């Protein structure tokens, strides 16, 4: 996949999303699963406002995407 320019670019995008998720205390696997579940629901939307709720720093992300904090029970 990464032996082409397009593949390398795709890998860089995925890596960037994963690292941004980690930097925002998200569990990357759960975050990607959420994105891949939610984005298809909006394919016919012309308003892209829903994307704000999908950003890694959005307070509207589901709790299962977040890593437990120091005060939370695992």
Image: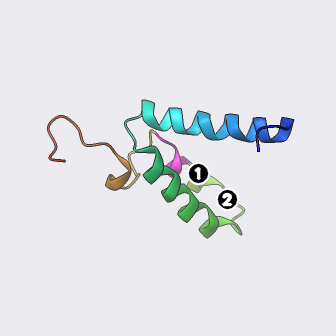
Compared with 63, 41 (above or below) is below
Instruction: Identify whether 12 is placed above or below 53.
Output: above
Q: Residues within 10 Å of mark 1 (few under 14, many from 20)?
A: few
In the image, is 68 to the left or to the right of 18? left
- The colour scheme used to paint the residues is rainbow
| Residue 14 appears left or right of 35 | right
Asked if the magenta segment contains residue 66, the reply would be no
Q: Which mark is residue 47?
A: 2
- Residue drawn at x 48%, y 41% as measured from the top left: 56
Q: Which residue is mark 1?
A: 51
Mark 1–mark 2 Cα distance, whole angstroms, equals 9 Å
Residue at x-position 19% and y-position 47% = 74
Circle on res. 8: none
User: Percent x, y for residue 54?
Assistant: 52, 50
Residues 10 and 4: in front is 4
Q: Which segment is the magenta one?
A: 52-56
Under circle 1, the secondary element is helix
Q: Find residue 13 and report its horizontal and vertical position in percent.
A: 67, 38
Q: Secondary structure at mark 2?
A: loop
Mark 2 is surrounded, within 10 Å at the Cα level, by few (under 14), some (14 to 19) or many (20 or more) other residues, namely few
């Amino acid at each position: 996949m990464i032996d082409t320019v397009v593949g390398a670019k795709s890998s860089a995008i995925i890596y960037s999303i994963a690292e941004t998720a980690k930097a925002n205390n998200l569990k990357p696997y759960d975050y990607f699963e959420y994105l891949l579940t939610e984005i298809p629901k909006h394919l016919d939307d012309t308003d892209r406002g829903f994307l704000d709720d999908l950003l890694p720093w959005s307070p509207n992300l589901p709790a299962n995407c977040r890593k437990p904090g120091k005060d939370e029970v695992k």
